[in-house]
Amino acid sequence: MAKSPEEMAAAMINNLAEKTGKTLAQWLKISKASKLAKHGEITKYLKSEHGMTHGFANLVASKTLEIGKKPASGTDLISSQYAGAKTGLRPVYDAIIVALNKFGKDMEISPKKAYVSLRRSKQFAIIQPSTATRVDVGINLKGHKATDRLEASGSFNSMVSHRVRIADKKEVNKELIGWLREAYDNA
């Protein structure tokens, strides 16, 4: 079964001491002592000066920068996605979520910084306000041929097979919800 990003991070933290010789707390102390403030700088430092692999260095850099910060709630992440020039797209997101909530209680809505992941036992779709005028819905429908509306995902996102571009709430229709339902049922 696929693991969530949170489960994968927890597994890495559990293996950190065995793989690197130091616990997360020890690495955080080293990382903070470097006085570096940017994620990329911390990652590069841990890799070059301490021989960490990229995955562990990335994890420690992320955890270093989390210290003292209040984590953003899912509501905060969604609000920030639809702020500013993208405010007018929030009704599109809301209409999709209303429809998806009818699928079942086992659906997980997992907001990220730039998009919302929709999961069951695995991710079946994402909702992303890609521009000020468009929301992209990525859907896992492997085996489906692309159409004018149901495009191959291409470079949009490698975690989904197809993309539907939506500019207006009216485009959240039976066809889109049908594709999302199929992806949900297969997840």
Image: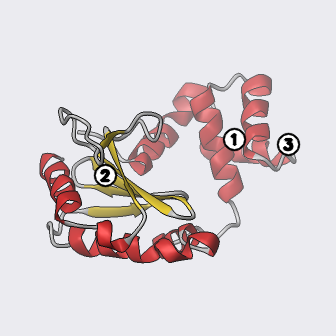
Q: Nearer the viewer, residue 50 or 139?
A: 139
How far from the left and from the top, in percent, is residue 149?
30, 49
Q: Look at the image and name its color scheme.
A: secondary structure
Disc 3 versus disc 1: nearer the observer = 3
Q: Earlier in the sequence, mark 1 or mark 2?
A: 1
What residue is disc 2 on?
A: 125
Q: CA distance from mark 3 to mark 1?
A: 11 Å
Q: Earlier in the sequence, mark 2 or mark 3?
A: 3
What numbered label is drawn on residue 27? 1
| Horizontal side of residue 99 vs 16, given as left or right | left
Residue at 63% x, 51% y: name it. Answer: 63
Packing grade of label 3 (10 A; few <14, some 14-19, many >=20) is few
Residue at 53% x, 75% y: name it. Answer: 79
What residue is disc 3 on?
A: 34
Q: Nearer the viewer, residue 69 or 138?
A: 138
Q: Earlier in the sequence, mark 3 or mark 1?
A: 1
| Horizontal side of residue 131 vs 45, given as left or right | left
The image quarter containing residue 147 is: top left
**Name of the residue lying farthest toward the right:** 35
Disc 1 versus disc 2: nearer the observer = 2
Q: Nearer the viewer, residue 140 or 163?
A: 163
Q: Secondary structure at mark 1?
A: helix
| Horizontal side of residue 11 vs 24, given as left or right | left
Residue type (three-letter) at the residue carrying disc 2? Ala
Disc 2 versus disc 3: nearer the observer = 2
